[in-house]
Amino acid sequence: MNGHLSGYKVSSSTKKVLINTDLASDILTKLNNCRLKKQFTDAILSVDQEELHCHRCVLAASSPYFKATFSSHFQEAIESRITLHDVSPWIMKRILEYIYSGQLEISLETAVDYLRTGHMLQYPYIVQACCDMLSRHLHPNNCLGIKELASLYECTDLEATAFDYVLEHFTTVAEQSEELAELSLSSLVTYLSADNADIGSEAVIWQALIRWTRYDAENRKEDLYELLSCVRLSVLSSEELSAISNDPLVCSQPKCLQLIEKALNKLRDSMKSSANVCDTRADSLLLQNARPSTLPRDMLVLFGGSSDYELSETVGYDPVKDRWTNLPPLPERVVRASVTAHDSAIFLSGGIVNNVLSDALWVFCCKMKTWTRGKSLMEARAKHSSVLMNGYLYLSGGVRMAEDQSVVPMAEIHSYHLKSGVWRRVGYNNIPKVESHLLGVNETLYELGGQSNDLYNMTMETYRVSPGGSVTRTDEHYVLPCSDEPGPLRAALHGNDHIIILWEKTGNIVSVNTTDNRLYRVNHTLGHVSGCLVTFSHHAYILGGYEDGKPSTEGKILDLRSESYKRVPLPPGLQVQKSVRVRM
């Protein structure tokens, strides 16, 4: 007896209520078997010359669309035959299986067809499942089409998600998406006008609109003025504006040329002439209309290559967006060079090029994303440290080539005045060091760690900098706390008055308050770490180095407030050697 009641529950009260939890699915299964055998079917769906037999009551119960159809006085209700247009027979068969079973397998390839048919036949669960599938697989190559699809079928959540995705990846969309050319004028204007389009440069907006126009130039060139009005022309350079004005389609539209000329005149009136390629001074009025994504923001720039100490490639990392950006490679492959940065410029000095000590100074302008050759160093050097403070670039320590062609330690401190372009000798190291770390805070240079006589130093020495840029060694000499043999250390400036020091061998981290030179231990669980060190917004980024004897493929981000950390994948194939923080 019990074997026949396995699907039932009997209440323990005096009234016995039988509850069969399997009854509904059993009935649907049996109804589906009847459908497949065309038993008791009383409705036919005519789909592209195929006839699908089913049950009116099941269709009406599953969908408001079918309920309304069978309840009407039209011919379909009388004959129980419904012709469905623009529906795939294969899709409709799967939906019928879903109606009778409650199961439907949706793939990225079928999601659009299921969404269209589900929307038409009023199956909201199918529509929602398709929206979820599409939102999880948004890509620069499909996001425009998915947004338009969602708008057409009133899928508001998917539409908003796809729209935000387009804006967040607009640079890639503008360059790669074939769907861009199929957009309507109004849709394109909406994207081009958006303040929160993440583009990096306003030139991306121009490139997007001209690509759309050229797709059907004869019919779209009349729309060029409206599209060009979406570009924040005032933030483009004179070179970019001139290139736009020389485009044949723009030349054919006098109103467009007037727009460009107006922007050029405004630029000429507002920009101040400067010989410095990295001069970013400009009338603030030029930037007040700029999109937030085109304004300079703090980024980390990593230098490395395919071997130890090599500097040949550069990548940018946006800590806020957790996004990597490819940057122009270095003009020449160099090892043991020094890299420092200030505001929106990066300075790479000296090093070894083709086994010869180099006297080169390379300057990277973050605004233009270009490398230019600066004035050569006073003397070729490598393994030195550098820092930029108060308009001067300081080089300290390292090695040079002696008259007998031997490599010897270098004790001279040189400075380069950015405005005048003049190098001069401004001081001396008490003890010459290689691979030390030089930081500048409040008219004081701090030299930390490094090696002298093949021994690692565990000291911090200070130098006072005069208003004219001369450097004088102070009597302040600090021994940094280290629980083991010193080994290499890394140092970075944190905020305006703290120095973060990392001992690679032990993983110990200390913070130095430069106002009173007091030291504070930073507790964490990183253990042994190596790599370059840079700080950003209460976080210490430890990037590159080695892990388990191999170049590290991950960086570590230490929260200096909670003293917890997380990992971030590094670009594949890049052995990170140096890192700096800049405005880009």
Image: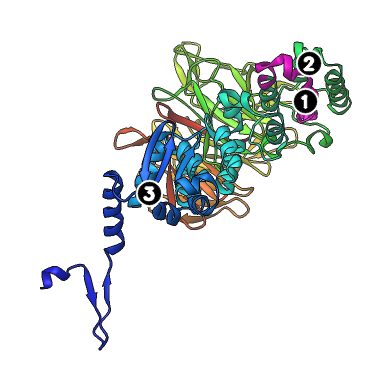
- Which residue bears the numbered disc 2? 250
Three-letter residue code for mark 1: Leu
Residue 543 picture location, percent across and down: 45, 37
Q: Between marks 2 and 1, how big is the CA–CA gap?
A: 9 Å
Q: Residue at x 28, y 64 (%)?
A: 23
Residue 216 picture location, percent across and down: 68, 17
Q: Quadrant of the C terminus?
A: top right
SS for callout 1: helix
Magenta stretch: includes residue 130: no
- Which residue bears the numbered disc 1? 228
Q: Residue at x 74, y 22 (%)?
A: 276
Is residue 385 found left or right of 25 in the rendered image?
right
Q: Give above or below for 557 relative to 572.
A: below
| Camera-side residue of 45 and 79 | 79
Is residue 393 found left or right of 252 in the rendered image?
left
Q: Give above or below for 334 relative to 118.
A: above
Q: Are marks 3 and 1 in contact (CB under 8 Å)?
A: no
Q: Earlier in the sequence, mark 3 or mark 1?
A: 3
Where are the magenta residues, as a range? 211-235
Label 3 or label 2, whichever lies nearer to me, is 3
Three-letter residue code for mark 3: Asp
**How many neighbours does mark 1 have within 10 angstroms: few (below 14), some (14-19), or many (20 or more)?**
many
Residue 417 picture location, percent across and down: 71, 26
SS for callout 3: loop
Q: Quadrant of the N terminus?
A: bottom left
Q: Are marks 2 and 1 in contact (CB under 8 Å)?
A: yes
Q: Residue at x 45, y 18 (%)?
A: 407
Label 3 or label 1, whichever lies nearer to me, is 3
What's the mark number on residue 42?
A: 3
